[in-house]
Amino acid sequence: MIKTAECRDSRFPIPSHMVTLQLSEFLRASLERWAHAGYPVETCGLLLGERNSACSTIKRVTQAKNLSHERTRDRYLLDPQDFLAADNAARANGMEVLGIWHTHPDHPARPSEIDQAAAWPEWSYLILAVTRDGVKDIRSWRLNGDMKFDEEVIQS
């Protein structure tokens, strides 16, 4: 398990209720490529890695099929077979599924009501705002005890 010190820079304190999401520039670039290539359809996948009480460290990102066919521009339905494959790969490598990434074509990187209704506690929900020109914003969210989203701090 990683230590908190690896996740946070003590020069910039983060409130104790906030969780940090570590995402390397390499993995971020992969997500941005997939998001731009999938535009204008919502694309999605999984975040795999390790976590402790203060930090989730993304070690691998995967793509998944979006099984939503009626509303592909504003809905995603992650393929359960892709989820199982990612979960098995994570476990085989000493990791776990930490959350889901998905895109919001031509919309802000904030969770929708549908996102909130489908969210699971303890998971990160990384949202990429994408337009035909590419990714405009990346933000991550996690449900709090009141079942509302709090924004996570993303560090490279």
Image (cartoon, rainbow, N blue to C red):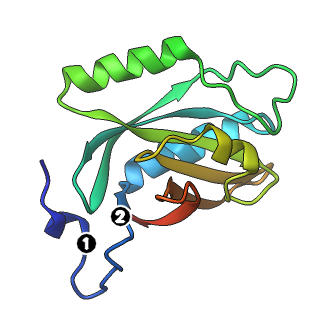
Q: Residues within 10 Å of mark 1 (few under 14, many from 20)?
A: some
Q: Residue at x 70, y 18 (%)?
A: 67
Residue 76, x across and y down, in percent: 70, 31
Task: Give the number of callouts.
Answer: 2
**Residue 102 - label:** none
Callout 1–callout 2 Cβ contact below 8 Å: yes
* Most distant residue in the front direction: 146
In this view, the residue in front, 89 or 121, is 121
* Most distant residue in the right direction: 70
- Indicate whether 13 appears above or below 123: below
N-terminal of the pair, mark 1 or mark 2, is 1
Residue 156 shows in this picture = no
| Helix, strand or loop under label 1 | loop
Q: Residue at x 67, y 25 (%)?
A: 77
> Marks 1 and 2, how far apart in space?
7 Å
Which residue is tagged 1?
8
| Helix, strand or loop under label 2 | strand
Q: Give amino acid for label 2.
A: Thr
Residue 129 shows in this picture = yes
Residue 109, x across and y down, in percent: 67, 58
**Residue 20 - label:** 2
Residue 13, x across and y down, in percent: 30, 84
Q: State left or right for residue 147 relative to residue 17.
A: right
